[in-house]
């Protein structure tokens, strides 16, 4: 529902950040690692978000990078892993470390994360090891860094969001936009970037 939320940070706690977007305050749950990367109160902040609905509770979870958000959503598909535990995993293990722990079946490393016991660690490995190739940890991370330094940042983000709203997953959208950026001139308009990206899917 919400690919990202961009506004002004007005309040933060160890668990949440509140962002004001044109007079509307969004309360977003964040990881411990995300907390350390927040700007000062009153400064701009953009978080990539996941909207989670569980029984009678609806909540937004926010991340500094799209990569973290995508992995969070992947973790939610593991049996017995809810938003709180998924957020704990993201907060205590950087994406590359989490990827390596699962690929290497490192139960001890996974068990160091608060809330993760041996059985949960085993489930993470069993249910995710065949999906690691879809994470594209290094490529997604590198792309996140690149677009954050690109003067066309807003245009790139809007193009990715447009593709996501059309039903494509985040990874597919990123790859298509990344390829299109190589083919188009730097002054290409948003509509041109979206059209080219659709052709690259």
Image: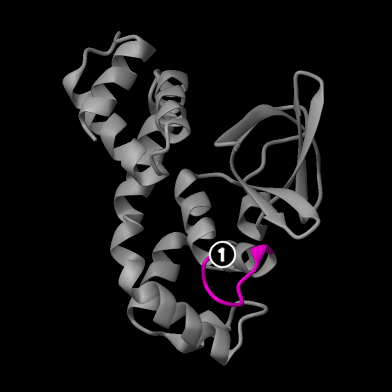
Q: Residues within 10 Å of mark 1 (few under 14, many from 20)?
A: some
Q: Name the residue under label 1.
A: 76
Q: Residue at x 42, y 80 (%)?
A: 125
Q: How many marks?
A: 1
Residue 176, by quadrant, is top left
Q: Determine whether, in the image, residue 105 is placed left or right of residue 65.
A: left
Q: Residue at x 60, y 72 (%)?
A: 81
Q: What element carries label 1?
A: loop
Residue 161: percent from left, percent from top: 47, 30
Say if 145 sits above or below 36 in the image.
above
Overall secondary structure of the magenta section: loop
Q: Give the range drawn in magenta.
A: 76-83
Say if 54 sits above or below 168 in the image.
below
Residue 114 is a magenta residue? no
Q: Determine whether, in the image, residue 198 is placed left or right of residue 167.
A: left
Q: Determine whether, in the image, residue 121 is placed left or right of residue 12.
A: left
């Amino acid at each position: 529902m919400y690919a990202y939320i961009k506004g002004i940070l007005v309040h933060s706690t160890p668990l949440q950040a509140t962002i004001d977007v044109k007079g509307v305050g969004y309360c977003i749950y964040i990881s411990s690692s995300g907390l350390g990367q927040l700007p000062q109160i009153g400064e701009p902040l953009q978080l990539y978000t996941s909207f989670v609905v569980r029984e009678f509770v609806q909540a937004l979870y926010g991340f500094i990078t799209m990569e973290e958000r995508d992995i969070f959503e992947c973790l939610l598909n593991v049996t017995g892993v809810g938003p709180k535990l998924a957020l704990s995993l993201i907060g205590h293990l950087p994406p590359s470390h989490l990827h390596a722990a699962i690929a290497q079946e490192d139960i001890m490393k996974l068990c160091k994360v608060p809330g993760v016991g041996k059985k949960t660690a085993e489930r993470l490995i069993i249910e995710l090891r065949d999906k690691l190739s879809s994470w594209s940890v290094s490529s997604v991370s590198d792309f996140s860094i690149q677009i954050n330094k690109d003067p066309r940042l807003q245009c790139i983000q809007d193009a990715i969001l447009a593709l996501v709203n059309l039903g494509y997953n985040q990874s597919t959208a990123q790859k298509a936009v990344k390829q299109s950026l190589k083919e188009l001139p730097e002054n290409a308009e948003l509509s041109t970037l979206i059209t080219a990206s659709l052709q690259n899917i």
